[in-house]
């Protein structure tokens, strides 16, 4: 039963009830054998909905059970590309009780009609298919397999966003034994996998949905089904077709699909589930790689193939970056040479130079190719050639160097793999330099930090710090490990511990190497930045001004260390309300980083975030909105949508949209951020702030029950992540208490607000904005409860400090 959400059907063709339950019926959207979908109107909140209703209460028990099951499944799914369930209930009617589902009404066209009406390009279709695949993967991650994916069940709105509908025959992994039995066939034949057609229990495997996505991709790209006759076939005929024949290659219908596009689509449609992609997310990743002319996983990734892709994608090589990579690897060879006996060093250096020559000549450096991605393509080709290196010392050196380079490009998974292997090879290699092994372990610890694997990172770094140091190189590495250990403390919310560690590192470096030593200056800049973060802006300011003058004199205005200090100084000035000084400094940093690194480098994105915050503080909302738009696009391009930086960028965008009255846009971005955070359990913390902010937005809109439910979820996760005595948990609790009060639960509000005020006062002080605000909320609650003495006993708000 697939609703047509474009327009209501002619109401004159069927008798329409005036109301069903609390909903006023406006028209008929669609109908099937067991039910109808009406266009209806809800009064609170006022909106149009799609109301799915069983035709009669006398339907078989199995149909009614599936209807109830659909409600349970949809309740688990909150994703911008999946039509939302607002409510489920039972309405009285002349025919008896009628179960209903009140769902989001999607304004749009089905997938095929949308693509045809917009004349989408191949790249646009691939992007749309990837977005659909990610939504399907989200459902799978919540245990839900759709089992009836087809173009008619995917509507695309005017903004190009897909929405998946109709989970009526969906399957809950590990929970649907009573609803799916061997031999039972559910779905739409042309889009069903062989195991689904056979009624096998494997039909509940997510790879059945992957098969359907492959068929949808084939049809969307070529305009025909891979097995056209299946539209009119019986189930048994369809099984025979799939077992005895193969679909025509996609390129027969769409020559432009020859190569990677065809490979990906045909793999998704493989007859055997084991030969398909293991998840819808893997398929989505592959589609995005094809769109971006990146190497796909479905074919052997030879160096020639990787570089061929790159040549097709870019025609403007900067030879400087090829030289930079050359210098990077040669530098590792020089250190290797000094770490070994002379004869052995010559042997290893010769082997490494041969590796380097092979890598660079395979890359065809005479081509005038692209600047920004050249290094990455050379690295990918080099990584593949590592397999042929048999000398363990050379292999360890190259793994370490390439791993550190991938880490600098924020390719953390690849970096971890290479650095782990470097450590293994170093341990097994005779004559390997001990300092080189320490370097690999330090880089490995940094990579663990980037993955927020804090316990593993702390163990690695603490072990490094504990090693004895005898010469300058070992001492410098020792202090570098201390710095990363401080960063770990900061990222885990231990601000005082992080600040103390950085102060100790700075002082120790100054004693050993001098106050203007490069590493000492970096440590001093780190310490000043953390003082600012910890609310000590006045103390940080003179130190940062001193450091900026020194670094500009020593290194120049474009040096990364100078830019880091200047950005930190701008943030400190903003905190001190010296916005007239902070904005020119921050704009200058961003302009330089855009020119030096490009628009999606992590440094550029951090500066975008800082300037977006500062322009908002200055009341420059238009500039701030443009910066946040750039930040969100850059974060998604760099890290993907389901990454904590992209989630934070979505939340930042929503915060401003909420403040400037773009409520619908703000809610959409909050929900996108929440869905992205829920796509991976490791991102759960990243979703806490967007959920809290969404709850605040819902409160502003007087959608209090929805806000209360959001706050409850936020508090559960905040208590698990931060603890009940953390000021962040207390801040969420204060807002939850205010929500309860507005809902009329003054007693519950009192409990939450009293507990929150106690923690906030202890951690932030009685005069902090959060403490004062919570105190005033509690005062209102006391008065509502008739506790005037308690209300009067609360301190009055102090005059805010300038």
Image (spheres, helix red, strand yellow):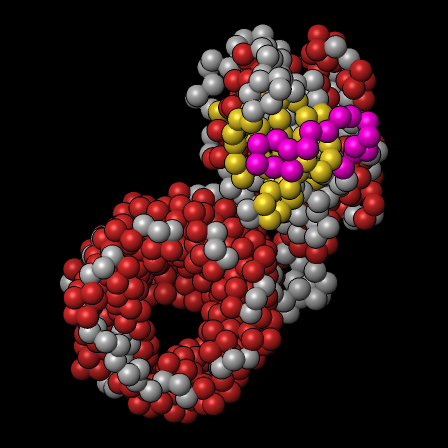
Residue pictured at 40% horizontal, 45% vertical: 709
Where does the image place residue 723, in percent across and percent down from the top left? 23, 52
Residue pictured at 64% horizontal, 42% vertical: 41
**Front residue (pair 587, 261):** 587
Q: Give the left or right position of residue 98, taking residue 718 as reference.
A: right
Report the number of discs. Answer: 0
Q: Is residue 15 magenta?
A: yes
**Front residue (pair 309, 190):** 190
Q: Give the left or right position of residue 675, taking residue 737 as reference.
A: right
Residue 133 lies in quadrant: top right
Please state, as top left, top right, bottom left or bottom right, where the N terminus lies in the image.
top right
Residue 681 lies in quadrant: top left
Residue pictured at 20% horizontal, 65% vertical: 788
Residue 37 lies in quadrant: top right
Where does the image place residue 263, in percent across and percent down from the top left? 69, 35
**Front residue (pair 475, 109):** 109
Residue 14 seen by the camera: yes
Q: Give the left or right position of residue 761, taking residue 490 as reference.
A: left
Q: Is residue 242 magenta?
A: no
- Decide: is 695 above or below 266: below
Residue pictured at 54% horizontal, 55% vertical: 667
Where does the image place residue 682, in percent across and percent down from the top left? 38, 46
**Front residue (pair 197, 441):** 197
Please state, as top left, top right, bottom left or bottom right, where the C terminus lies in the image.
bottom left
The boundaries of the magenta stretch are: 8-24
């Amino acid at each position: 039963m697939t609703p047509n959400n474009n327009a209501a059907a002619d109401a004159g063709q069927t008798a329409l009830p005036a109301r069903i339950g609390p909903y006023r019926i406006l028209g008929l959207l669609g109908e099937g054998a067991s039910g109808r979908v009406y266009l209806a109107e809800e009064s609170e909140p006022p909106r149009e909905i799609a109301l799915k209703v069983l035709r009669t209460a006398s339907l078989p028990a199995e149909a009614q059970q599936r209807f109830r099951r659909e409600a349970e499944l949809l309740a688990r799914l909150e994703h911008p590309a999946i039509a939302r369930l607002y409510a489920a209930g039972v309405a009285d009617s002349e025919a008896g009780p009628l179960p209903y589902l009140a769902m989001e009404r999607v304004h749009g066209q089905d997938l095929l009609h949308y693509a045809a009406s917009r004349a989408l390009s191949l790249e646009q279709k691939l992007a749309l298919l990837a977005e659909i695949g990610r939504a399907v993967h989200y459902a799978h991650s919540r245990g839900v397999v759709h089992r009836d994916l087809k173009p008619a069940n995917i509507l695309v709105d005017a903004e190009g966003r897909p929405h998946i509908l109709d989970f009526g025959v969906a399957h809950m992994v590990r929970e649907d034994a009573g609803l799916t039995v061997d031999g039972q066939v559910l779905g739409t034949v042309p889009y069903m996998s062989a195991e689904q057609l056979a009624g096998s229990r494997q039909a509940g495997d997510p790879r059945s949905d992957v098969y359907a996505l492959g068929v949808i991709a084939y049809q969307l790209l070529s305009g025909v089904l891979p097995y056209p006759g299946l539209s009119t076939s019986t189930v048994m005929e369809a099984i025979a077709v799939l077992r005895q024949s193969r679909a025509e290659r996609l390129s027969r219908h769409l020559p432009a699909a020859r190569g990677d596009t065809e490979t990906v689509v045909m793999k998704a449609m493989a007859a055997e589930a084991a030969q398909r992609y293991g998840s819808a997310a893997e398929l989505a990743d592959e589609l995005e790689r094809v769109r971006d002319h990146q190497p796909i996983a479905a074919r052997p990734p030879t160096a020639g193939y990787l570089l061929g892709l790159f040549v097709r994608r870019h025609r403007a090589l900067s030879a400087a970056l090829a030289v930079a990579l050359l210098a990077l690897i040669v530098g590792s060879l020089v250190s290797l040479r000094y770490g070994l006996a002379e004869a052995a060093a010559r042997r290893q250096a010769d082997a490494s130079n041969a590796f380097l020559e092979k890598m660079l000549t395979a890359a065809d450096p005479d081509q005038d190719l692209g600047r920004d991605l050249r290094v990455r393509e050379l690295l990918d080709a080099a990584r593949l050639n590592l397999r042929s290196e048999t000398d363990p010392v050379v292999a360890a050196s190259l793994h370490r160097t390439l791993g550190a380079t991938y880490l600098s490009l924020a390719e953390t998974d690849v970096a971890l793999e290479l650095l782990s292997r470097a450590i293994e090879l170093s341990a097994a290699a005779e004559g390997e330099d001990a300092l080189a092994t320490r370097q690999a372990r330090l880089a490995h610890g940094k990579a663990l930090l980037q993955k927020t694997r804090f316990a593993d990172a702390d163990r690695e770094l603490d072990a490094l710090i504990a090693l004895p140091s005898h010469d300058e190189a070992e001492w410098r590495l020792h202090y570098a490990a201390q710095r990363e250990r401080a960063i770990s403390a900061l990222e885990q919310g231990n601000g005082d511990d992080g600040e103390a560690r950085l102060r100790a590192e700075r002082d120790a470096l100054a004693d050993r190497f001098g106050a203007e030593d490069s590493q000492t200056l970096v440590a001093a800049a780190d310490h000043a930045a953390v003082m600012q973060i910890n609310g000590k802006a006045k103390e940080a300011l003179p130190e940062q001004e001193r450091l900026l003058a020194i670094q500009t004199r020593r290194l120049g205005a474009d040096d990364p260390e100078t830019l880091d200090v200047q950005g930190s100084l701008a943030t400190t000035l903003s905190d001190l309300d010296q916005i007239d000084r902070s904005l020119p400094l921050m704009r200058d940093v961003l302009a330089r980083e855009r020119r030096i690194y490009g628009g999606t480098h992590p440094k550029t994105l951090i500066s975008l975030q800082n300037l977006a915050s500062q322009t908002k503080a200055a009341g420059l909302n238009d500039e701030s909105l443009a910066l946040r738009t750039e930040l969100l696009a850059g974060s998604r391009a760099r890290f993907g949508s389901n990454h904590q930086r992209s989630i934070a960028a979505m939340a930042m965008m929503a915060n401003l949209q909420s403040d400037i009255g773009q409520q619908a846009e703000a809610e959409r971005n909050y929900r996108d951020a929440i869905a992205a955070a829920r796509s991976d359990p490791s991102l759960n913390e990243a979703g806490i702030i967007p959920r809290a902010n969404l709850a605040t937005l819902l409160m502003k809109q007087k959608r209090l029950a929805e806000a209360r439910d959001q706050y409850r979820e936020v508090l559960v996760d905040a208590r698990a992540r931060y603890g009940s005595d953390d000021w962040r948990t207390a801040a969420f609790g204060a807002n939850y208490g205010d929500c309860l009060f507005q809902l009329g639960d003054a007693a519950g509000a009192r409990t939450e607000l009293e507990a929150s005020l106690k923690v906030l006062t202890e951690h932030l002080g009685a005069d902090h904005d959060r403490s004062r605000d919570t105190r005033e909320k509690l005062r209102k609650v006391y008065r509502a409860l008739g506790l005037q003495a308690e209300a009067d006993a609360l301190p009055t708000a102090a005059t805010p400090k300038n």
